[in-house]
Structure formats: C-alpha cells, structure tokens
Amino acid sequence: MLKKIHHLGIAVNDLEQAVNVLKEAFNLEVGGIEEVPSQQVRVAFLPVGESRLELLEPTSEESAVGKFLAKRGEGFHHVAFETDSIEEALKLAESKGLRLIDKQPRPGAHGTKVAFIHPKSTFGVLVELVQEGDES
Ligand code: CMX
C-alpha cells in the first residue's frame, strides 16, 4: 500500500539560507518554494533521486513547525510515505491502533492529499501520508 518515501521534512529557521546551503553542498536542484497558509509554513522541495527533502520555515510561532522549533530547534520533523490510497492507508493505521491527527485527508502542497499520524504512536516520528494529485 505504501509506495516509497515521498519526502523527509526538516524544520529550519531561515528557508533561503537552508536552501542555499543544501543546494550548494550536495549539488541539488530546488524544486520550488511555496507558502502553505493552512499549515502556516513556507516550504522548499529539493529532489533527491525519486524522493525529496522538504524544508519547512514557520510563518507563525503558534504553528506546528513554530512550536517544534521553539521546543527542539532545527532538525528532522517528519517522514512522508506515498500511497495510492490515502483513505485505505488511514483506515489500516487506525485499525492497528495508531493515533490519527487527520481522520480525513486534506489538501497538501502541489495538489496532493495528505494526512498526519501522531508521533506518540509511531515511536517519536511524525508520519505524513501523501497521495499524489493530477497537478503534482
Ligand atoms: N516529531 C516528533 N515529535 C513531535 C513533533 C514532531 N514533528 N512535533 C511535536 N512533537 C512532540 C512534542 O515534542 C511533544 O512531546 P513531549 O510530550 O514528549 O514533550 C508531543 O509531540 C506532543 O506535543 P503537543 O504539545 O501535545 O502537541 P503539539 O501542539 O506540539 O503538536 C503535533 C504536535 C504533532 C500534533 C502537531 O505538530 C501536528 O498536528 N502536526 C501535523 C501537522 C504538521 O506538522 N504540519 C507541518 C508540516 C506541513 C507540511 O509538510 O506542509
């Protein structure tokens, strides 16, 4: 049901600075920068083979990423798994006792559908499920 690691999310204080460092140090392309108002973040995607890094900078201290940075500082924030059927993947995870943050998928960046699973039920790692849309 899961196809691959879609991306790894990294929380940063300064998006442009982080993009430049990783782009130059690892000779990566930058797939695009966009604001996701519903999550109160600005994000940049840097493709790495079939997967990518997602750098996340909060636009509000009260956002999920803003609170994460205040508490833990910059670093690994979440792993995102790509699935063909996000509804089925959510149903399975819930049936096995995982704590869903999103019971229903919601719109993510680049026309995707996304849903999060609480890190307390997945060994301290925040998990995102992603289903690609037609635009991505
Ligand atoms: N990874 C691991 N643990 C995390 C975490 C993360 N990314 N974010 C928070 N936690 C930990 C907290 O440190 C806290 O741990 P302790 O209780 O041991 O101190 C615990 O989870 C619960 O924290 P909380 O105070 O109850 O809840 P928060 O208000 O910090 O919210 C979470 C945590 C995961 C529910 C919230 O961040 C959330 O809903 N995340 C999903 C949405 C999201 O992360 N969006 C940003 C990405 C958007 C994108 O990719 O476009």
Image (cartoon, rainbow, N blue to C red):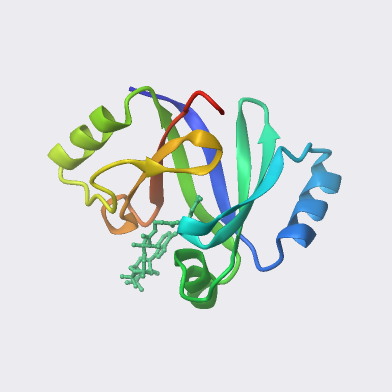
Q: Quadrant of ligand 1?
A: bottom left
Assign the N terminus to one quadrant of the image: top left
Q: Residue at x 86, y 46 (%)?
A: 24
Residue 10 lies, in percent from the top left, at 59, 54
Q: Which percent across, then down, holds residue 130?
A: 42, 35
Residue 67 at what x, y percent from top left? 47, 73
Q: Quadrant of the C terminus?
A: top right
The relative height of residue 67 versus residue 82 in the rendered view (above or below) is: below
Q: Residue at x 84, y 38 (%)?
A: 27
Relative to 53, 28 lies left or right: right
* Numbered marks: total: 0
Q: Residue at x 47, y 69 (%)?
A: 63
Relative horizontal placement of residue 68, taking residue 49 as reference (left or right): left
Q: Name the residue: 50% across, 65% down.
A: 65
**Residue 46 shown left or right of residue 108 in the figure:** right
In the image, residue 73 lies at what x, y percent?
A: 57, 71
In the displayed structure, 126 sits above or below 108; it is below
- Quarter-of-image position of residue 53: top right
Q: Is residue 112 above or below residue 64?
A: above
